Image (tube, rainbow, N blue to C red):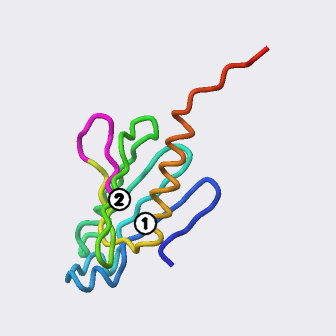
Amino acid sequence: MSVAATPDRIEVKSSRLWALFHFNFTRILFPARLIADTIGISSNIIRRWYLPWERTDEHLPLSHVAEVAHTRGFLWDRISVESSGGLNPLVVSGLSKGPARHFVDHVRERLNESTAAPRPVQR
């Protein structure tokens, strides 16, 4: 299964079948991941299969997330999380359609909750 979810954490992984079609041996062995929790969004990406200890772990706090872009493909999707500074977005390709849509909906819902203004108290 490509999505692991708890109430506070959701994770989506790239498809091994996508990696096979793209001849990406590293993604077959080590799928790329996007993880969203109450603190922010993280990515875990291993770039070379022969050096798995050289992993890129990036984290973006929810307060710095500017946009979550969901690019829908014919078979697989791509998610790009852009920061408010505009540098180095977190990008994972080759995601299954359903889990990618669920991840994006969940993150956007969290962003909307965190930016919603508190309602004034009426007396």
Q: Decide: few, some or many residues near mark 1? Use Cα within 10 Å; few <14, some 14-19, many ≥20.
A: many
What amino acid is labelled 1 in the image? Ala
Residue indicated by mark 2: 70
Which residue: 23% across, 41% down?
Answer: 87
Question: Is label 1 in contact with label 2 (beta carbons under 8 Å)?
Answer: yes
Q: CA distance from mark 1 to mark 2?
A: 8 Å
Residue 63 location (% of width, % of height): 45, 35
Task: Say what amino acid the circle numbered 2 marks.
Answer: His
Q: Earlier in the sequence, mark 1 or mark 2?
A: 2
Frontmost residue, 45 versus 119: 119
Of 56 and 63, the residue lying toward us: 63
Q: Which residue is rendered at x = 43% and y = 66% of the image?
A: 100
Q: Quadrant of residue 84?
A: top left
Residue situated furthest right in the rendering: 123
Report crowding for label 2: few under 14, some 14 to 19, many 20 or more residues within 10 A (C-alpha): some
Up the image or down, 101 lies above or below 75; here it is above
Among all residues in the image, which is located at the extreme top? 123
Image side of residue 73 versus residue 38, left or right: left
User: Is 95 positioned to the left or the right of 7 in the image?
Assistant: left
Answer with left or right where residue 93 lies relative to residue 12. left
Which residue is painted at 24% across and 75% down in the image? 50
111 within the magenta span: no
Image: magenta residue range: 79-88
Disc 2 secondary structure class: strand
Give residue 16's quadrant in the image.
bottom left
Q: What percent of the width, then of the height, locates residue 85?
A: 28, 34
Name the residue rendered at 29%, 57% in the picture.
91
Q: How far across and how far down the image is residue 101, in percent?
A: 45, 64
Residue tagged by mark 1? 100
Q: Position of residue 79 (x, y in %)?
A: 34, 59
SS assignment at label 1:
helix
Q: Quadrant of the C terminus?
A: top right
